[in-house]
Image: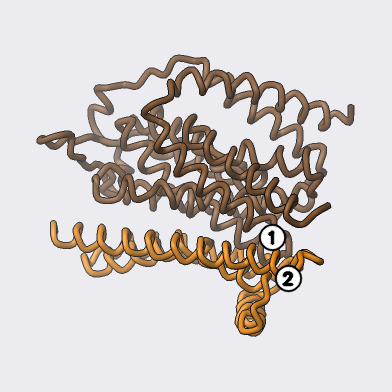
Chain colours: A orange, B brown
Amino acid sequence: MNGLVEHRRRITLGILRVSIGLCLAMLLAGVVLFLVHGGAAQPANPGGSLPYILDAVLHRGGMLHAGAFLVAGLLVLLFTPVARLIAGVYVSARARDGVYVLIGLVVLGLVLVGMILGGG
Amino acid sequence: MNPLLIVSSMLLGGLVAGVIGSLTGLGGGLVIVPFLTLVFHLPVPQAVGVSLFGVIATSTGAAPRFVGTGLANVRVGLFLQVAASSGALLGALISHRVPAHFLFLIFGIVMLYSAIMSFVPTSHDAAGAARSSPLAERFRLASRYRDGDHWVAYQVAGVAPAFAIMVGAGFLSALLGIGSGVFKVLAMDKLMRLPFKVSTATSNFMIGMTAATSAGYYLSHGDIPPLTAGAVILGVIAGAYAGGHWMKRIPTRLLRRLFAVVLCVVALDMLLKGFGL
């Protein structure tokens, strides 16, 4: 059981460190690109379904578009708690704790429903 | 307005929110929404959406402090998260149908409540619950945490009323762009009778997930201006980091009370806006 707790600790810390670093780098790059490009117009608000937003980020990211980097940073931040939740579900599954796997999946479902309804 | 000035002022707003949030424990949301609506005249849903991302940032930034300490009760957090995320989803769904003046009214009331709570001496039940409630037993919520070189076991009571409070906390979080930590800690401390350290750590675990439920909705709905959000979040993270370092040197109790006075003034401004004055 102690091994499992340590496993959960390492996964969680890894997720937190990587995502905060990635989020900061993306947001900083976005702000700098906005200023370097003259700051003529603020990037448009992203919207629609998640695949649509992701597609726009990937498409414009290659063109060093400030908005793409900013939205990518926001997506990384948004998915950090989700990734922690998925890690929790995984650890519960390894411990064969079916009740908490189910509870974790319900919470995950609620987060995804929010995204789907917002895009609709 | 000069682009550099726009970015700088938003960074500064986020920085102030991050510092105040980490030093006072009241959360950055109470600063970001008034800052963006009253100073930058951003529409309320956009200010709320940006603030929710700020809440995720502060929660994520503070999380490594709690990970591995055993203080956060993951089972309690996940169980109550069902309620908090349901409330958050409900709040996000109706957010665009609630008139702005009504949101200012609710925000003003929540701010006043948070300010008043800063002056009320906190009393924690050191003994905790004598035995777990049947629901807590069924979901195996009782646990233990390490305090120095020994383990402290605790029981869990009042699960059903705390679950109901979490629906409300999630609802307010989504509607107002706040972490609702004050309500979450209150429910776990007073109703479930968890040790205070466990309540704060578990609340931190939950706040990010609650905010993510509604932030996803606001993002997909097109309510997040990326530049504003990016600059504010960079400021929030830097401010929270600086606040964490200053915490040991600054008398936080005095600061918390000073901030409460400022909160009262801003709350009155929000209430006046709510009443159309």
Left or right, residue A6 beside residue B91: left
**Location of residue B193 in the rendering, given as x and y in whole percent from the top left corner:** 33, 30
Mark in the foreground, 2 or 1: 2
Residue displayed at 71% across by 37% down? B34
Numbered marks: total: 2
> Circle 1 is placed at which residue position?
B227
Placement of A77 over or under B38, stated as above or below: below
The one nearer the camera, B126 or B82, is B126
Chain of the residue under the numbered disc 2 shown in the image: A
Q: Is residue A106 visible?
A: no
Judged from the image, the secondary structure of the residue bearing numbered disc 2 is loop
**Location of residue A10 in the rendering, given as x and y in whole percent from the top left corner:** 25, 61
* Amino acid type, label 2: His
Left or right, residue B200 beside residue B166: left
Chain of the residue under the numbered disc 1 shown in the image: B
* Amino acid type, label 1: Leu
Judged from the image, the secondary structure of the residue bearing numbered disc 1 is helix
Image quadrant assignment for residue B215:
bottom right
Disc number at residue A37? 2
Instruction: Please identify the residue farthest to the left as the structure is shown.
Output: B149
Left or right, residue B246 beside residue A36: left
Residue displayed at 75% across by 23% down? B268
